[in-house]
Image (cartoon, grey):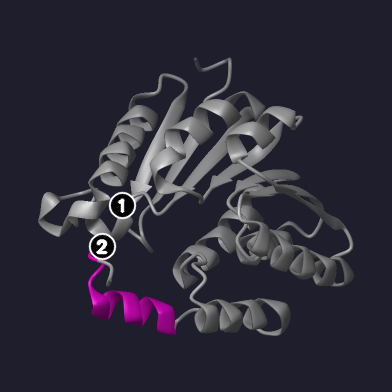
Amino acid sequence: MESKIVDQHVESYIRSLLPEHSGLLKELETFAGLHKVPIIHPEIAQYMTVFLNITKPKRILEIGTAIGYSASIFAHSMKSGHIDTIELNEIMAEKARETFSRLEGILPEVSVTIHQGDAKDVIKTLDGPYDIIFIDAAKGHYQAFFETAYNLLSENGIIVSDNVLYKGMVATNEYLVRRKITIVKRMRKYLDFISKHPNLETTIMPMGDGLAISYKKGSNNE
């Protein structure tokens, strides 16, 4: 299903300007295309590259690993630090382990630990704080992930939520597919929640499949 968020001509033009990846990242993109594994959109990958170079996080929590593509994007931008990443699917987690084994040889100053299991359970076993929490897992459970992970976010930390407009269906019922009603309702509730959260400043951007950036104000601004 095509995205209804950005005009196709605009999206194609933006993507034509993006730098082409090589090595491990290119291999992961090819693998994802061949095996229909969802990975972050090219413009989101580039946005996160710029974003992480600006914010310079040292600890990242990622909810939703898949084959390890987005974590690898993060690692290339961090240069040094640690990433905890959580994946429910055992087959995806095994592929991600292969990815991170190779990544270790490329970026030895960035350590990545993959946790296989249900994120809502795994998060409870982790120790924060994290400078950035990246949510890109089951779309109907974003608020549950947020509520479980929020206390692990550092003061002035940032939560990034991907796919929040979900092919435009979250924005308008005109695009809504009946079998996606529950997911869409939950995502709308989540976006309303983070937009009105008293300790967050949130912006929602119509890029990729929709991206929300939520900045934790910190105790001095609460």
Q: Is residue 140 shown left or right of residue 157?
A: left
Near mark 2 (Cα within 10 A), the count class, few <14, some 14-19 or many ≥20, is: some
CB-based contact (under 8 Å), mark 1 and mark 2: yes
Q: Disc 1 marks which residue?
A: 165
Q: Is residue 56 shown left or right of residue 137?
A: right
Q: Amino acid at mark 2?
A: Ile
Residue 66 is situated, as x and y percent measured from the top left of the image, at 60, 61
Give, as a single range, the part of the protein colored magenta.
Answer: 4-16
Q: Amino acid at mark 1?
A: Leu
Near mark 1 (Cα within 10 A), the count class, few <14, some 14-19 or many ≥20, is: many
N-term-proximal mark, 1 vs 2 = 2
* Whether residue 128 can be seen here: no
Q: Is residue 204 shown left or right of residue 24?
A: left
Identify the element where label 2 is drawn.
Answer: loop
Rendered-image quadrant of the N terminus: bottom left
130 over 83 or under it: above or below: above
Q: Residue at x 68, y 28 (%)?
A: 124
Residue 104 is situated, as x and y percent measured from the top left of the image, at 86, 65
* Whether residue 187 can be seen here: yes
Instruction: Tell me the quarter of the picture where residue 122 sits.
Output: top right
Q: Is residue 35 shown left or right of residue 5?
A: right
Identify the element where label 1 is drawn.
Answer: loop
194 over 55 or under it: above or below: above
Q: Disc 2 marks which residue?
A: 5
207 over 216 or under it: above or below: below
**Residue 8 falls within the magenta-colored stretch:** yes
Q: What's the distance in space between the residues labelled 1 and 2, CA to CA?
A: 8 Å
Q: Residue at x 66, y 83 (%)?
A: 27
